[in-house]
Image (cartoon, helix red, strand yellow):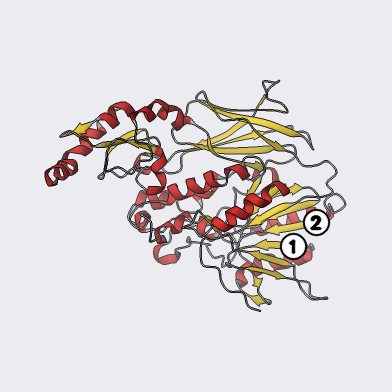
Amino acid sequence: MRVVALVFAAGSADTCHDQTGCGECVNRTVVGVHACYWCEIDQGCHAVGSAVSPCTPGGADDACISLASASKCGHKSADACDAAGSDASKPRQIHLSLGGSGGMRVTWKTRAKVSTVSVMYAEDMSTAVGELATIERSVEYLKSQGGHGYHHVALMSNLRQDTTYQYRIVCDGVTSRVRQFRTESSDHEAASFLVVGDMGYGAAGEAVASRSRIEILKDRTNLTLHVGDISYADDSFLHLHTSCPEEFCYEAVYDNYMEWIENVSDTKPYMVAAGNHESECHSPACLVSSEIKESLRNFSAYNARWAMPSLESGGVANMWYSFNFGPVHFVVVNTETDFPDAPEADYGDGGKIIGLKAGHFAPNGAYRAWLNTDLQEASENRAQRPWIVAFGHRPWVFQNGTSRDHAVEAAHSDLFQKYGVDLYLAGHVHSYHRVSPRSGNPAVPTVVTGGGGGGGIKKDKK
């Protein structure tokens, strides 16, 4: 066994790397022992136990194929190679977001680079070919370790109100199943929305109970609002009972989270706000690789994986934007960057010591100017949309009125009061609080719902 182990360590890497197809890869042996695994994400062959690839983390086992007994790959049969090509092009992690008046965006991931992508939509896909959506972008934000997949965005437009639409995605001939969504009602009289914040993935992210609750509530709501800290991919190295303290798990955890919520996000809009855990990756595996940490700095994964209606509302990326739904004008605020003394004004969540440069998504003062204009227009349009609801990551008041994050308060509170924002939804504090100002107090009612998982839930004060 010792001789075999030495042969694996010294010679298998090159032997495996030379294999150009899945079948050749998984059937390759060294001294009679299967030595390689095929990774669908980078479409490469790697040596078991010696190569770092996008399929290395335990959370990515489903993306690799191997016959080696020492491999932890989820697929242990060479027959899986028959579907490897289509699996790499398969649309995954499908999620919707509102795309302005009459528009709906759909975003998804493919493990491999694809040559052609299309989205077709119609009221009934069984009787109509469907309209072609506008493809807006296809990006790969992390090229390290052979690449970690591509993220695609398309806009379905000219949608009629109060109508159910079906859609499907095609990537290099691989077609998703037909999904559907319903546009908002034309009377704007009512809307129901699900609010979640600070939610990790699975048992390691302390989020199983929250995910179960979402499953119960999803059919009763029109859309989901996630008030920041999505998946806690950056903190996966803290999951000591997994392999993540030693491995680069950021992408695997984020991918798993997106797969986990897909049956919520592929039929109803899933709208997000930036939290501090979106800012960068500060795990040991990130810090030792200049390529990885640079690729993941300044909210890059967050802005690539999601596509909010900033273009239609004058916002910037997914950092700040607004949208209308039912009787509500929603304003998504940026509590992390682009205002004086912002938490990530210049550096990410790791701070000056280990954090990388962050913020500066727009010129100084641009964010506040946008917020003022957006709230003013919403205030003047209350006859059509009587409610103004803001959501962002950090609260500046919680529990029994305790004040916190004064810089965030200074950037937002006066404008909220000036234009009569009716409700502010936030997370960050891992608990649940409702703060209702007393009569005569101009402060905005606030709900803090940072108990979705991802960190220990703090005990509420009476």
- The residue at the point 33 percent across, 42 percent down is 53
Residue 133 picture location, percent across and down: 64, 29
What kind of element bears circle 1? strand
Q: Is residue 154 above or below residue 372?
A: above
Residue 459 picture location, percent across and down: 58, 74
- In the drawing, what numbered circle is on residue 370? none
- The residue at the point 73 percent across, 64 percent down is 415
Neighbour class for label 2 at 10 Å: few (<14), some, many (≥20)? many
Task: Please say whether residue 19 is visible from this viewpoint.
Answer: no
- The residue at the point 60 percent across, 71 percent down is 405
Q: Quadrant of the C terminus?
A: bottom right
**Looking at numbered disc 1 in the image, what kind of residue is underneath it?**
Leu
Residue 4 lies left or right of residue 83; in this view the side is: left
Neighbour class for label 1 at 10 Å: few (<14), some, many (≥20)? many
Q: Earlier in the sequence, mark 2 or mark 1?
A: 2
Q: Pick the residue in front: 114 or 455.
A: 455
Q: Which residue is mark 1?
A: 423
- Assess whether mark 1 and mark 2 are in contact (beta carbons under 8 angstroms): yes
Residue 301 picture location, percent across and down: 49, 48
